[in-house]
């Protein structure tokens, strides 16, 4: 049986690119993308970036649930700026860059573009936390993966 590949992005130097299409369910009655969908698209892109960096979120959550040293990333700050609307059937690319890396958190900048049009941008901070919500250092291997990603100049 032939099965389509799940959606995924690509690493392009120090940026991650993730494609989405605007479906009917993403729009309001006027055919314009509902504002909260940008948050969903940005989250999907960040999750895909982690996967491409070799960061296994599911294993970390399962480890934390069993009393291990696991945890999860949680969005602690986000600032969105809407510039132009995305419309039904538009192809949109989400670009993600990591702008600052700390022991327990990182700052990212994400943009949604339709070709050359900047639609929405987000400045955000994501923290690594225990499953009961306390800040925790990111695993060293994960920080190393982010450092490599941030320093790529391709």
Image: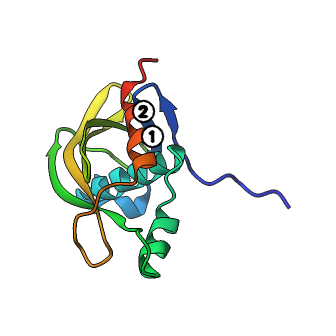
Residue 81 circle label: none
Q: Residue 106, image x and y in percent?
A: 26, 46
- Cβ–Cβ below 8 Å for labels 2 and 1? yes
Q: Is residue 12 above or below residue 95?
A: above
Point 21% across, 50% down: residue:
125
Point 71% across, 54% down: residue:
4
- The kind of secondary structure element at disc 1 is helix
Q: Is residue 7 above or below residue 60?
A: above
Residue lying farthest to the bottom in this orientation = 66
Residue ID for mark 1: 145
How far separated are the C-alphas under marks 2 and 1? 6 Å
| Res. 22 visible in picture | no
- In this view, the residue in front, 103 or 15, is 103
In which quadrant of the rendered view does residue 28 lie? bottom left
Q: Quadrant of the N terminus?
A: bottom right
| Res. 138 visible in picture | yes
Point 34% across, 47% down: residue:
87
Discs 2/1, front: 1
Residue ID for mark 2: 149
Q: Residue 122, image x and y in percent?
A: 21, 44
């Amino acid at each position: 049986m032939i099965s389509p590949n799940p959606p995924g992005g690509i690493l392009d130097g120090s940026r991650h690119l993730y494609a989405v299409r605007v479906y009917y369910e993403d729009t309001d009655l006027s055919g314009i993308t509902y504002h909260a969908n940008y948050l969903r698209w940005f989250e999907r892109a960040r999750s895909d970036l982690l996967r491409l960096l070799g960061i296994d979120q599911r294993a970390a959550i399962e480890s934390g649930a069993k009393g291990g040293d696991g945890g999860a990333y949680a969005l602690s700050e986000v600032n969105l700026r809407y510039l132009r609307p995305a419309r039904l059937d538009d192809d949109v690319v989400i670009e993600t860059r990591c702008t600052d890396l700390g022991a327990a958190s990182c700052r990212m900048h994400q943009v949604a573009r339709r070709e050359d049009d900047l639609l929405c941008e987000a400045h955000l901070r994501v923290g690594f936390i225990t499953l009961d919500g306390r800040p925790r250092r990111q695993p060293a291997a994960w920080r190393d993966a982010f450092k490599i990603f941030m320093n790529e100049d391709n």
